[in-house]
Image: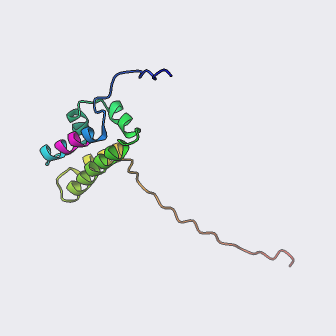
Amino acid sequence: MEKKKSVGRPLKYPTPELLQNKVTEYFETEEDVLTVTGLVLHLDLTYEGFAEYGRRDGFSAIVKKAKMRIEDHVNKAALKGGYIASVAIFNLKNNFGWKDKIEQEITQTTLNIDMEQ
């Protein structure tokens, strides 16, 4: 039986452990300002390459947790006044899927008119 040939470039981080170690290194060295861009650059990946790891078995939890940690950092820093509110809002909406929630209350009134008079 023939072995399957891999197509494309080999993974920069062939095991989840190697990726996790590099992600941990980023969080240990960049304590003040955490960004997805900073993490991706630290990993020496592109956004697309980082997203690809997020779709791979064994790697996806690492990517999700790293992004959640950055999201948490941005949120907390904004609440403490560490970020300009508009910058934090822009970042959270564009990088983490936050949305403005508009609530509408609709009331219905029934009016009965007697037309038989």
Q: Nearer the viewer, residue 58 or 116?
A: 58
Relative to 107, residue 67 above or below: above
Residue 100 x %, y %:
40, 53
Q: Is residue 73 magenta?
A: no
Residue at (35, 47) in percent of width and height = 61
Q: Nearer the viewer, residue 61 or 93?
A: 61
In this rendering, does residue 90 appear at all?
no
> How was this image coloured?
rainbow
Determine whether, in the image, residue 112 is placed left or right of residue 2.
right
Q: Quadrant of residue 23?
A: top left
Relative to 40, residue 111 above or below: below
Determine whether, in the image, residue 80 is placed left or right of residue 72.
left
Residue at (41, 39) in percent of width and height = 55
Q: Nearer the viewer, residue 79 or 107?
A: 79
Q: Main secondary structure of the magenta part?
A: helix
Q: Nearer the viewer, residue 44 or 109?
A: 44
Relative to 71, residue 8 above or below: above
Q: Is residue 21 magenta?
A: yes
Residue 117 x %, y %:
86, 79
Magenta region: 20-25
Residue 99 x %, y %:
40, 51
